[in-house]
Image: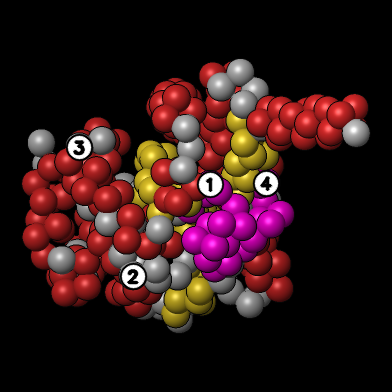
Amino acid sequence: MKLKTGLLVLSAALSFNAYAQAPIVIKFSHVVATDTPKGQAAERFKQLAEKATNGRVKVEVYPNSQLYKDKEELEALQLGAVQMLAPSLAKFGPLGVKEFEAFDLPYIFPSKTALYNVTEGEIGKSLLKKLEPKGITGLAFWDNGFKVMSANKPLRAPADFKGLKMRIQSSKVLDAQMRALGANPQVLAFSEVYQALQTGVVDGTENPPSNMYTQKMHEVQKYVTVSNHGYLGYAVIVNKKFWDGLPADIRTALDKAMREATTFEKAIAQRDNDMALDAIKKAGKTEIYTLSVKEQAEWRKALLPVQQQMEGRIGKDLISAINKEAAK
């Protein structure tokens, strides 16, 4: 009997030990390709996190909407079905944190320096804090640069948009932006855009060049306008309950890994967009046009009213604070 009891104790101890040594799994889901800035940074975070925790954490990256599409991923995070996401900042408006839609305002960031003054300063920190009541902890802002416009007709003046069906993310600001240009905004999941462009369900869209190229949208769009009218960025977020429940030393190691992955991501974002635009040009299927200073001024004039329209939704004080920070 003693032998049997001893074996049971030993078996239980071994089982417990095996359980204790099982790595903490972080499922990191996103909707873009692995070779985009976000995709590469997610892979870099995986490497850094696993190394920094000596294998106590295992990061499983699921790119290209393998697990969830745009509208599904935030709910999946809140439910704990995945632990980490890097959604575009436009996704937080539908969640009820409308302040993030300030990032969608056209021409609000005149440069990357102005942008980083906001994301890396007090405004950025206070915005991430607003996610906590939703069960979400914000870890970092990732960058995907400024957007170009594309369609199957040249887009050189605001009047050229009249009547076009333009795909947007689910964002009231982007809806207002397209309407200010005379277009008809169409909300579609990112994974559905290529087919919608190919079949004519929509006429055009807006994207940073790296997203456009990796999703092969240039194959079904004859014209691209380098307008730099809007910004596309991401917030890396985790399920708050999961994050708060991690051992303190693990959390510290993951924070460090995220800081390093963020530095890497920012370094490659502009490079990858420049390379993507060059690759689109070399593919020979798309004519690329860069707005002149005069033409860009015309676009700015057409789109400036969007800021005033959105003051009630985003907050007049926040928009003013961003404009002030961007002007430094």
**Circle 4: residue type:** Tyr
Reading the image, the residue beneath label 2 is 96
Quadrant position of residue 66: bottom right
Reading the image, the residue beneath label 1 is 84
Q: For the residue carrying disc 3, how many other residues have a C-alpha within 10 Å: few (<14), some (14-19), or many (20+)?
A: few
Residue 40 picture location, percent across and down: 59, 33
Reading the image, the residue beneath label 4 is 62
**Circle 1: residue type:** Met
Q: Residue at the spot x=53%, y=47% of the render? A: 84
Residue 219 picture location, percent across and down: 69, 54
Q: Residue at the spot x=74%, y=29% of the render? A: 13
Foreground: 51 or 141? 51
**Circle 2: residue type:** Gly
Q: Residue at the spot x=14%, y=57% of the render? A: 318
**Mark 1 or 4, which is nearer the eye?**
1
Residue 145 picture location, percent across and down: 41, 42
**Circle 3: residue type:** Gly
Left or right: 315, with 217 as reference point: left
Q: Which residues are magenta?
A: 61-87
Left or right: 231, with 264 as reference point: left
The quadrant of the rendering that contains the C terminus is: top left
The Cα atoms of the two marked residues, 2 and 3, are separated by: 23 Å
| Disc marking residue 237 | none
Dot 1 or dot 2, earlier in sequence: 1
Q: For the residue carrying disc 4, how many other residues have a C-alpha within 10 Å: few (<14), some (14-19), or many (20+)?
A: many
Dot 3 or dot 4, earlier in sequence: 4
The Cα atoms of the two marked residues, 1 and 4, are separated by: 10 Å
Reading the image, the residue beneath label 3 is 121
Residue 78 in view of the camera: yes
Badge 2 marks a residue whose secondary structure is loop
Badge 3 marks a residue whose secondary structure is loop
Dot 2 or dot 3, earlier in sequence: 2
